[in-house]
Amino acid sequence: MTDPKNTAPTEVDVEPPCPRCDKPLELCVCTSIVPLATRRHILILQHPQEHDRELGTAKLTALHFKNATLKVGLSWPNLAKAVGRPVEARRWAVLYLGPAKLPPEAQNRPVVLLDRTNKPLDLQGQQLVLDDLEGIILLDGSWSQAKTLWWRNAWLLKSWRIVLNPPRPSRYGRLRKEPRRESVATIEATAQIMAALENRSDIAPPLIASFEALLGKFRAVKRPARARANAADLAADSGSPDETLSPVE
Ligand SMILES: [Zn+2]
């Protein structure tokens, strides 16, 4: 059986990528990025087999912040090792992958904080924890790669969990498979979380602009094979044996 991803054209990969964002030059949108200073740290853990150099957004996201760390790997002994300095796991929150049943009062909050039993905090409790957060953790890769990162790093259980109520579906549209409506790109998730945590209106717009510029360039390059490969991938990936992180169909 032929893997459709392996038959996709690779002509843009011939020339060396942009040294800053690692994208093929014709997809580079990083030249105008000015890194933002934020109070909280952003840690992005990327699965080593996340091969989506063209549409992946982890590196792009990290470039937007002075206070961001991108680590590629499968597992780290603890949060401090992943961040590279001593940290308190209870002052960090990880973007949670599994479905969460939110009570009606939480469904209009853009960012909802869950405890380790996946129970949403009430608004007051959430605000107290969010105000005290030192950093956020995002798992980057395909849906199944992100799940692997979750299970391989048990220390993630010590941190709070964030779930998002995105105002709109991911801008990826059909370009990348997303198992649930609330699944968004790393750069979209980071924009939403950091804007809420730092209570700033100047964080999301440049991130979303970079993402839209990337998607615009990608669409201009025309990759119909890509959409077909993702449709096949999504169909193959929709069955999940585990309960707590299985996608909601
Ligand atoms: Zn670049």
Image (tube, rainbow, N blue to C red):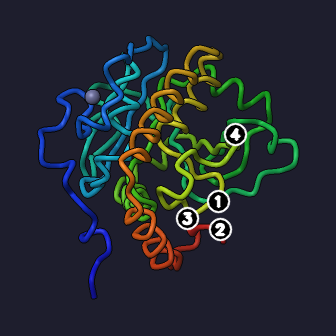
The residue type indicated by label 2 comes to: Val
Q: Which residue is mark 2?
A: 248
Judge by depth and name the residue closer to the eye, 54 or 216: 216
Residue visible at 79% across and 32% down in the picture? 123
Helix, strand or loop for disc 1: loop
Between 238 and 129, which is closer to the camera in this rendering? 238
Q: Is residue 2 above or below residue 99?
A: below
Return the mark for residue 112: 4
What secondary structure is found at the residue carrying circle 3?
A: loop
Looking at the image, residue 92 sits to the left or right of residue 20; the answer is right
For the residues labelled 2 and 1, say whether their Cβ atoms are less than 8 Å apart. yes
The amino acid on which the numbered mark 3 sits, given as a three-letter code, is: Leu
Marks 4,3: beta carbons within 8 A: no
Residue furthest right as drawn: 104
Q: In 3D space, how far apart are the residues under numbered discs 2 and 1 (Cα atoms)? A: 7 Å
Q: CA distance from mark 1 to mark 4?
A: 12 Å
Q: Give the numbered dot on residue 99.
A: 1
Circle nearer the viewer, 4 or 2: 2
C-beta proximity under 8 Å, tags 4 and 2: no
* Residue type of the residue flagged with mark 1: Pro
Residue beneath label 3, please? 245
- Looking at the image, is mark 2 or mark 3 nearer the viewer? 2
In percent of width and height, residue 206 lies at 51, 21
Image quarter of residue 36: top left
Q: Quadrant of the C terminus?
A: bottom right
**Percent x, y for residue 101?**
75, 57
The residue that appears at 12% across and 42% down in the rendered structure is 15
Residue 49 position, x and y percent, is: 25, 58
- Amino acid type shown at disc 4: Val
